[in-house]
Image: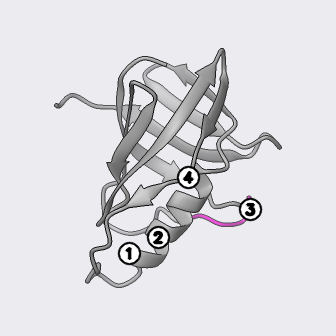
Amino acid sequence: MSTTNTMSTGVSGAHASETCFALPSTLTLTFESGMVRGSAGCNTFRAPYTSEGNRLSIGAVATTRKLCAAEGVMEQERRFLAALETAKAWTVESGTLDVHRSDGGRVLNAIGRKGP
């Protein structure tokens, strides 16, 4: 996977019934040089990743430890980061990154964005 700057438009939790992208915060991801980095809404994160074809594996996530003042953001971050670690496959179609678990359930979808 080459450098991809994305802004998440939807995130599912570790189970299909969980949805954790409901708050007015921005979740971002950048895949580059074997690392995925971004914002989980309040804190930043990074994790190693590998990809081969459409297979994706994201390792243990490290985050900053800021206290997020907005109600629910800490829980949203926890769910987002836990879901990210379940990623097993990815596709990019029409500028949208779509990431799935091994059972085919969606982890997240994100749109490309311009920026540094």
Query: Could you say which quadrant of the image residue 15 lies in?
Result: bottom right
- Mark 1 — residue? 73
Callout 1 amino acid: Val
The C terminus: image quadrant: top left
Name which of mark 4 and mark 2 comes first in the sequence.
4
Residue at image position (67%, 45%) is: 106
Q: Residues within 10 Å of mark 4 (few under 14, many from 20)?
A: few
Residue 103 counted in the magenta span? no
Magenta span of residues: 15-19
Name which of mark 4 and mark 1 comes first in the sequence.
4
- Dot 2 and dot 1 residues touching (CB under 8 Å): yes
- Mark 4 — residue? 60
Name which of mark 1 and mark 3 comes first in the sequence.
3
For discs 3 and 4, the disc positioned in front in the rendered view: 4
Disc 4, SS: loop
Disc 3, SS: loop
111 and 2: which one is in front?
Answer: 2
- Mark 2 — residue? 76
Disc 1, SS: helix
Mark 1 and mark 3: Cα distance apart in space? 19 Å
Callout 4 amino acid: Ala
